[in-house]
Image (cartoon, grey):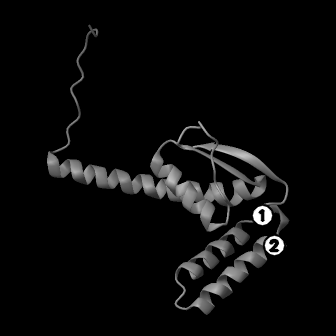
Amino acid sequence: MNALLEKIKKIEALIAGAQTDGEKNAAISARERILRNNPSLQIEARAKEFSLSMPSNWHKKLLLAICHKYGVKPYRYHRQKYTTVMVRVNEDFLNRVLWQEFKEYSKLMEELVTEITDDLIAKIHQHEEEDLIQGELN
């Protein structure tokens, strides 16, 4: 299964880096063939509704981008929290493709945000830890 996921990632890179419409269409067709020929990765076969709660708007935007990349239509119900994302997909596809890719990009995004934050704070003032005072809070 990992080899298949790696193949999908390579095809996604081809789609992103395509120089012409023909190259892009060929790569999209290859991705669709792989997904069609592997029932466990088919998005709509045996689809269930899943509720995914994101810790921040950044994470939600990332998940939405990944969903749209694979043709999944995310939604939320009236009065659900803004950071809740609902999807209707095959559970295997959610676990093996969407969620794995989300975790990878999420880790990269968090590292990048931490790096930018640390750099910004260093430009404002040398980062120092707060003092720890023994005693009770009044």
Residue for badge 1: 41
On screen, residue 85 above or below 33: above
Q: Name the residue located 23 percent from the left edge and 18 percent from the top edge.
A: 133
In the depicted view, which residue is nearer to us: 72 or 54?
72
Image coordinates of residue 10 in percent, x first then y, are 61, 77
Q: Name the residue located 16 percent from the left edge and 52 percent from the top edge.
A: 123
As helix, strand or loop, the secondary structure at mark 1 comes to: helix
Name which of mark 2 and mark 1 comes first in the sequence.
2
Mark 2 packing: few (<14 Cα in 10 Å), some, or many (20+)? Answer: few
- For the residues labelled 2 and 1, the Cα–Cα distance comes to 8 Å
In the depicted view, which residue is nearer to us: 31 or 57?
57
Residue 71 lies left or right of residue 122; in this view the side is right
Image coordinates of residue 51 in percent, x first then y, are 67, 43
Residue 65 lies left or right of residue 32; in this view the side is left
Q: Name the residue located 71 percent from the left edge and 45 percent from the top edge.
A: 50
Residue 90: quadrant of the picture = bottom right
* View extreme (front): residue: 78
Q: Which mark is residue 36?
A: 2
* View extreme (left): residue: 125
Q: Name the residue located 71 percent from the left edge and 58 percent from the top edge.
A: 96
Q: Which mark is residue 4?
A: none
Image coordinates of residue 92 in percent, x first then y, are 77, 56
Task: Give, as a three-letter code, the residue at label 2.
Answer: Arg
Task: Give, as a three-letter code, the residue at label 1.
Answer: Leu
Mark 1 packing: few (<14 Cα in 10 Å), some, or many (20+)? Answer: many
As helix, strand or loop, the secondary structure at mark 2 comes to: helix
Image coordinates of residue 72 in percent, x first then y, are 68, 61
Determine whether label 2 and label 1 are within 8 Å by CB: no
